[in-house]
Image (spheres, rainbow, N blue to C red):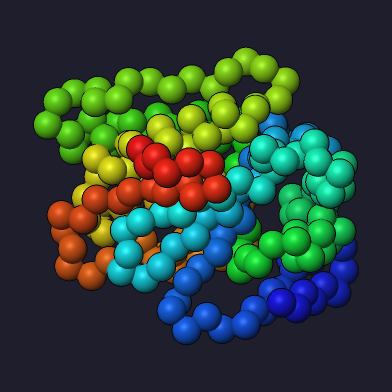
Amino acid sequence: MIAHSNAPDEPILLTTQVRGNGQRNLIILSIDQIDVPQPNLEGIWLLITLPENPNLTLVPIYPNHQENASFSTPYSEVFSMTTAQLPSPQFLDLLIEKVLWDNYLITDRNGTSSILKILQEAAEINAEVANPVGNFWLPDVSELTLDQQTQLWKTVCTYLSQVSGPDNIEILLNQVSPYLLTNFDLDDLPLTHLGNQEEVQLECDFPTLSNDSP
């Protein structure tokens, strides 16, 4: 993987070795608040998708069960945002060194709450019974633990599993896009190219946490 940056506030241009299976690795950064000079990093997750495949693979990078080990990388200490609301080159360099990824996506707690509400409403519309999984509220704590973040992702996956068809998924992506900062086109996410599988249901796998999927 090679990174090119001409100035601190310019987007990082990434090129990676081509993976023949079309796999896309998306880094998702969770922060506490976007519209502050120096937000705090709360979580880093790797979202792995494949074309024509409704399964999502989610891997926690930070925090994780080994975060206190001697080889742990201090992601939160290195993390910062530029004045253009981009991850700093130093932080991206650290990610490039440790993780194979293609693009990044950022959201904060307010954005996550809004996204959850949108997904829940879509799930209720598409489900046979109203409110199939209930509400999930972000805990009012200074930092979200790995278990709390995992539960959040499982809730998102449960909502998404109620929504079938690429057209509905594309509509959802358009609705949540205002709450996301990213350096790629959400339309390029393989989930929006599931062909004519109108009845397909998304499922999530957390291979480094357990064998359970929501």
- Visible in this render: residue 131? yes
Q: Quadrant of residue 36?
A: top right
**Residue 144 on image: x %, y %:** 65, 27
- Looking at the rendered image, the quarter that the C terminus falls into is top left
- Please report the residue visible at 26 percent of the width from the left and 59 percent of the height from the top: 166
Image vertical order of residue 173 relative to residue 98, above or below: above
Q: Residue furthest top?
A: 140
- Please report the residue visible at 30 percent of the width from the left and 69 percent of the height from the top: 52
Depth check: 65 or 175 in front?
65
Image vertical order of residue 45 relative to residue 148, above or below: below
- Please report the residue visible at 62 percent of the width from the left and 15 percent of the height from the top: 140
Left or right of 133 in this view: 141: right
- Looking at the rendered image, the quarter that the N terminus falls into is bottom right
- Please report the residue visible at 67 percent of the width from the left and 17 percent of the height from the top: 141
**Residue 179 on image: x %, y %:** 54, 42
Q: Quadrant of residue 103?
A: bottom right
Depth check: 47 or 129 in front?
47
**Residue 19 on image: x %, y %:** 52, 80
